[in-house]
């Protein structure tokens, strides 16, 4: 259900499983807890995702811990909240199993704490998304790349690349938070970028916070 993008059904199934007799199976509660968190994230309920992730702080399974820490970092970046914590989470995730979208999430966290050169280098060297990547992950990678290029660059070539990445995110997983945020950024992106500014905090392109969703007819998260 989750892989098919049927997020509400996946969450309901996970919650039902957590209440069944199978909850005694080791690791099952952590697994269904992650499904609840990731479906809330993809639906745009980012605070709900953070709440669900709090119960998974002590996950022992290596693969699930990767998924939990990666999701935590991506959620905090989308919330534009606590970049230092987001950076710690994504560094731990990348130490377990690096993926293209993780590199891009780390770049956003680095830029938010002022490590701009390191962030720019990560985006420049980030590998492309593989064709076989599942839709939600492909949308995340494309969104974070496009949002970063739009946020950081005044070069017309980078703006074109940003728009292409955001269009890919919009198409990869329709209805998810990444498609909706990509739509909002595309609607508000300038036809040509203004002159680069040092004061990134005052640049309207600098934030990925939820208020951007309201532009371009997108529904709120």
Image (cartoon, rainbow, N blue to C red):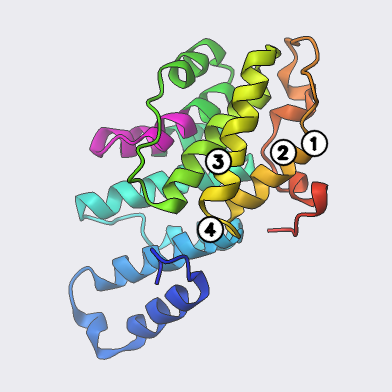
Tag 3–tag 4 contact (CB < 8 Å): no
Q: Give the range drawn in magenta.
A: 90-106
Is 132 placed above or below 190 here? below
Element type where label 3 sits in the image: helix
Classify 201 as above or below 215.
above
Kind of element beneath mark 4? helix
Query: x%, y% of residue 103?
Result: 41, 29
How many neighbours does mark 3 have within 10 angstroms: few (below 14), some (14-19), or many (20 or more)? many
Q: Which of marks 3 and 1 is nearer the N terminus?
A: 3
Residue located beneath label 2 in the image: 185
Q: Alpha-carbon distance for marks 4 and 1?
A: 22 Å
Q: Return the disc, 4 or 1, that comes first in the chain's sequence.
A: 4
Closer to the eye: label 3 or 1: 3
Disc 1 element: helix
Q: Distance between the residues labelled 3 and 2?
A: 13 Å
- Is disc 2 in contact with disc 1, using a CB cutoff of under 8 Å? yes
- Cα distance between the residues tagged 4 and 2: 17 Å
Measured from the top left, where is residue 95 in percent x and y? 26, 33
The residue that label 3 is drawn on is 168
**What residue is disc 4 on?**
42
Q: What element carries label 2?
A: helix
Which is more foreground, mark 4 or mark 1?
1
Chain-order first, disc 3 or disc 2: 3
Instruction: State left or right for residue 53 relative to residue 173.
Output: left
Q: How far apart are the alpha carbons under marks 3 and 4?
A: 16 Å
Prevailing secondary structure class for the magenta stretch in the rendered image = helix
Residue closest to the eye, 65 or 7? 7
Figure check: 4 above or below 97: below
Q: Do the residues labelled 3 and 1 touch (CB within 8 Å)?
A: no
């Amino acid at each position: 259900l989750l892989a098919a993008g049927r997020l509400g059904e996946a969450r309901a199934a996970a919650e039902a499983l957590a209440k069944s007799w199978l909850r005694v199976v080791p690791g099952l509660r952590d697994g269904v807890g992650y499904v609840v968190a990731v479906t809330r994230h993809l639906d745009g309920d980012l605070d709900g995702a953070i709440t669900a992730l709090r119960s998974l702080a002590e996950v022992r399974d290596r693969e699930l811990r990767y998924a939990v820490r990666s999701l935590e970092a991506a959620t905090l970046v989308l919330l534009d909240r606590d970049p230092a914590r987001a950076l710690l989470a994504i560094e731990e995730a990348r130490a377990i199993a690096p993926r293209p979208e993780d590199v891009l999430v780390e770049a956003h966290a680095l830029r938010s704490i002022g490590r701009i050169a390191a962030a720019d280098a990560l985006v420049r060297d980030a590998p492309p998304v593989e064709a076989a990547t599942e839709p939600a992950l492909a949308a995340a990678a494309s969104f974070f790349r496009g949002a970063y290029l739009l946020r950081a660059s005044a070069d017309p070539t980078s703006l074109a690349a940003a728009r292409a990445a955001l269009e890919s995110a919009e198409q990869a997983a329709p209805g998810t938070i990444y498609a909706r945020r990509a739509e909002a950024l595309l609607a508000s992106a300038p036809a040509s970028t203004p002159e680069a500014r040092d004061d990134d905090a005052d640049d309207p392109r600098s934030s990925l916070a939820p208020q951007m969703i309201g532009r371009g007819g997108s529904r709120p998260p």
